[in-house]
């Protein structure tokens, strides 16, 4: 039941995109049994010598013993580490159970009280956990709907960040010097004017799902010839779009650190087709009832987290190879949230 190693960005969406509602329910039920049996005993204490900065003054969590968790992709691990470090600076004893395999295991840990806090994504909750087929376009209304619907599951949602880890199409700056694409409507116009120019590299799953390429084509009134769609692993997409001429456009995640590192332009989803995946802290409700001060500790953090900040931090892990815990700690110290020693 221990954490697994870092997965690829393809795995980042496993809990959102793969399988159907039935598959998820079966998996969740099986996992619930597994969790109740092993008690999620894996994990390690956070031993960092950190003290309050702009948050945690007076150590309001002194005497508390709290567990943080996350899914097992870089961004979510970084966010889970941030929560743990802030709790630690506020006086709590913190058990680190980040890097759990997939979305379901971390979700179940929060529901059952095997973990107290993590960052979750509004679109994941609305579509995958709560079973809705259509996203809510307005990010705030999406968060409010998730917050209200998840109360019955013993999950408390704190205010969301503007960090939005959703799907997008991207083009290299070099190629975009010729086409000047800014929006997906621009892509639709180009596909009608010059169909052979629009080649797209995507994952297999994105190529077939209604909330992926087929749905996007329908929403924007474009039709990309099958021969112009190339399927490959997510990691290869970035390289192909950046360094070759085989794909003009590629499927990306908006917070991926490789976007900036590989000099890609992300095209605006001007018709708001893709769901909002804003990151927000979720807390096991009995824990929040006992320690409502958690809100005042994490709200300032969420207010600072943006898509651009996530790109920068994710790049440190996925491009530079840095440790997620150290990346989280360095950023929190630099931002003044916590102090070292």
Image (cartoon, rainbow, N blue to C red):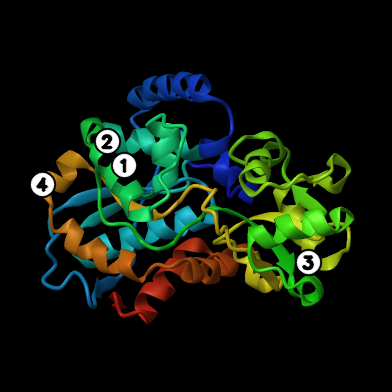
Mark 3 or mark 1, earlier in chain: 1
Q: Looking at the image, which residue is at 32% across and 59% down?
A: 83
Number of on-image labels: 4
Residues tagged 1 and 2 counted as in contact (Cβ below 8 A): yes
Residue mark closest to the camera, 1 vs 4: 1
Image-based side of 260 in relation to 305, left or right: right
Residue mark closest to the camera, 3 vs 2: 2
Determine whether the residue tagged by mark 3 lies in a helix, strand or loop: helix
Q: Give the distance between the C-alpha atoms of the residues marked 1 and 4, in whole angstroms.
A: 22 Å
- Front residue (pair 25, 189): 189
The residue indicated by pointer 4 is 290
Q: Looking at the image, which residue is at 56% across and 43% down?
A: 13
- Front residue (pair 154, 71): 154
The residue indicated by pointer 1 is 146
Label 3 crowding class (10 Å Cα cut-off): few <14, some 14-19, many 20+?
A: many
Residues tagged 4 and 2 counted as in contact (Cβ below 8 A): no
Q: Looking at the image, which residue is at 78% across and 71% down?
A: 179
Image-based side of 242 in relation to 130, left or right: right
Q: Which mark is residue 283?
A: none
Q: Give the distance between the C-alpha atoms of the residues marked 3 and 4, in whole angstroms.
A: 50 Å
Residue 211: % across, % down: 58, 39
**Quarter of the image that includes the C terminus:** bottom left
Q: Which mark is residue 242?
A: 3
Residues tagged 3 and 4 counted as in contact (Cβ below 8 A): no
Residue mark closest to the camera, 4 vs 2: 2
Residue mark closest to the camera, 3 vs 1: 1
Mark 3 or mark 4, earlier in chain: 3
Residue 36: % across, % down: 33, 24
- Front residue (pair 185, 206): 185
Mark 3 or mark 2, earlier in chain: 2
Residue 249 against residue 309 in the figure, above or below: above
Which corner quadrant of the image does residue 50 belong to? bottom left
């Amino acid at each position: 039941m221990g954490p697994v190693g870092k997965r690829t960005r393809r795995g980042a969406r496993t809990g959102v995109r793969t399988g159907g509602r039935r598959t998820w329910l079966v998996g969740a039920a099986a996992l619930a049994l597994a969790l109740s049996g092993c008690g999620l005993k894996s994990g390690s204490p956070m031993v960092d010598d950190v003290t309050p900065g702009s948050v945690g003054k007076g150590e309001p969590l002194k005497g508390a013993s709290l567990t943080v968790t996350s899914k097992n992709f870089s961004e979510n691990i970084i966010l889970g580490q941030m929560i743990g470090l802030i709790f630690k600076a506020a006086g709590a004893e913190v058990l680190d159970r980040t890097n759990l395999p997939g979305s379901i295991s971390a979700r179940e840990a929060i529901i059952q009280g095997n973990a107290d806090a993590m960052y979750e994504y509004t679109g994941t909750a609305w579509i995958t956990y709560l079973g809705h087929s259509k996203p809510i376009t307005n990010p705030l209304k999406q968060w409010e709907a998730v917050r209200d619907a998840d109360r019955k599951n013993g999950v408390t949602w704190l205010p969301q960040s503007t960090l939005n880890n959703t799907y997008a199409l991207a083009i290299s700056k070099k190629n975009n010097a010729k086409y000047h694409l800014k929006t997906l409507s621009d892509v639709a116009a180009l596909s009608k004017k010059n169909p052979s120019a629009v080649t797209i590299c995507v994952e297999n799953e994105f190529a077939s799902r209604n909330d992926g390429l087929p749905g996007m084509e329908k929403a924007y009134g474009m039709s990309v010839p099958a021969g112009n769609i190339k399927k490959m692993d997510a990691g290869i997409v970035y390289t192909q779009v950046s360094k070759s001429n085989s794909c003009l456009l590629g499927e990306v995640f908006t917070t991926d650190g490789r976007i900036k590192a590989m000099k890609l332009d992300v095209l605006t989803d001007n018709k708001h087709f893709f769901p909002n995946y804003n990151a927000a802290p979720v807390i096991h409700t009995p824990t929040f009832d006992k320690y409502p001060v958690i809100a005042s500790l994490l709200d300032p953090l969420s207010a600072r987290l943006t898509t651009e900040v996530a790109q920068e931090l994710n790049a440190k892990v996925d491009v530079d190879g840095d440790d997620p815990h150290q990346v989280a700690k360095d950023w929190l110290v630099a931002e003044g949230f916590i102090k070292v020693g």
